[in-house]
Amino acid sequence: MSFDREKKSESYTEDVVAVGPIEDDSKLLADDIRRVAERKLVRKLDFRLMPAVAIIYFMNYMDRAAISSARLQGLEADLGLTDVQYDTVVAILYASYCPAQIPSNMILGYVNRPSLYISACVVAWGLTSVLTGITTNFAGIIACRVFIAPAAFYPGSMYLLSRWYTKKELAFRSAIFFVGLLVSNAFGSLIAAGILGNMQGKLGIAAWRWLFYIEASGTGAITMFVGLQATWILPDFPHNTRWLNAAERKLAQVRLAEDAGEADQDAANATIFDGFKLAIKDPKVLIFMLMSCSQLLGLSYINFFPTLTATLGFNTTITLLMSAPPWIFASICCLANAWNADRTGERFFHIAGWWWAVILGYIISLCTMSIAGRYFSLFLMTTGYCGYSLTLVWVSSAVPRPPAKRSVAIGLVNGFGNLGMLMGSYIWKANWSPKYHPSMIIALSALVFATFLSFTIRWMLIRENKQMDKDDMKFIQGPDRARIEEAARLEGITFDEAIRRRRGVRYLH
């Protein structure tokens, strides 16, 4: 098998029930009771975990989006920023954000209470957001944006989701989580339109500062409040979450064990560096890292979206109002795409297909400066994030075990991937406006390369699945067939069901 097999039983102290051997998991509950209990468990997770992470992500990107809106109303002039300095303000977030994600996820996979760790980071970055509005120069705004606390949240939350939801549940939940980013772009633009259109000069303060005082500082304060509440809202791991009883913790562990064919636990003697060693040696992880970097370079327009919308020729208020509908459209597409990905188990086309829509959008923008054509291209461009929302979902299913390896793989892929955003901060140059043809050609080429890399990953996974099928066929036709049939008879299941259990899982591609 391609997966590293860890021990299939684990004992815990206090009142936590241990997971038994996988062969015994089917005897935990009768089928009808099991289905009801599992639905109740998933609903409990959905009502606590999903709203918390979606709201926090929404607040995080409201803060990030404020700077692109503020640019339209004099931020550069008031702070004395050059074009390169503004690009640096955008890029500096990723300069610290990218490398910090890897050790952060290494820590997250090692700590016993991820709810406390994530919540502390959320409160810290909320405080930083509150301070952004009082900056007076380039150094001050750089100091606010270089803070690394947000690095823990997105990859950390994706890892936490992968510790609770099965492969057939994870894509849609990750999309709900990710829609917080997409919706924040829409609502951020609408809020910015009201503030920048009506607050210029009030109390002698520039409108862009009011934007940071009201939007960034307001969301920062709310983020701090939500972060404090998240200490008891968020779960920890299936074996030690405090607001689940022993039976629910047992069921949560069994669900993941059955989904993977083995217990979702690290070895008892695993160190914080073991997961990193395993992840960095896996060629799929390295290709995922390059793919994610290239993908985000191709989608780097997000930090300049109001600027691109401004090329349509309208005033600031109308520009910001027009910036919202494409993100609402992308949010709907994101949820529909993830729902279908869960139902079909397919990954490649549900990710790369949206990049092709972005490529079409770039081609339209390269061919015309008409308002209708360019605005339509903006709708196509935003849908690229429908594919991005499933990238770490694909990583978690392609690099599933042990959990420490999965955690580091997620951190590596997302951390290295955001280097694409850092590079992208410098390709949307003001002197290339209003057409931005060089920018779009660079971004288009990056998405073509990302497509090639994602196809390579798909081919690797298909090849490994076929090899596992061949290994299983040799086993079925060998001398152990009679033993499998006898085991199936004793357990009261069909021979095919017994074989399916022995096969464990297959990679989703």
Image (cartoon, helix red, strand yellow):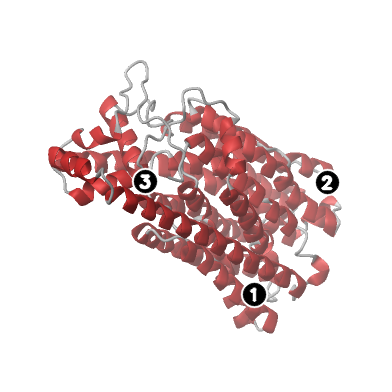
Q: Is residue 71 visible?
A: yes
Pointer 3 residue: 166
Q: Amino acid at mark 1?
A: Tyr
Q: Which mark is nearer the camera, 1 or 2?
A: 1
Residue 423 % position (x, y): 74, 56
Horizontally, residue 149 falls left or right of residue 251, namely right
Residue at (26% x, 28% y) in the render: 247
Pointer 2 residue: 138
Disc 2 residue crowd, few under 14, some 14–19, many 20+, Cα 10 Å: some
Q: Amino acid at mark 3?
A: Thr
Which residue sits furthest top? 14
Residue 403 % position (x, y): 48, 36
Residue at (61% x, 55% y) in the render: 292
Disc 1 residue crowd, few under 14, some 14–19, many 20+, Cα 10 Å: many
Residue 94 % position (x, y): 70, 47
Depth check: 265 or 332 in front? 265
Q: How many marks?
A: 3
Pointer 1 residue: 362
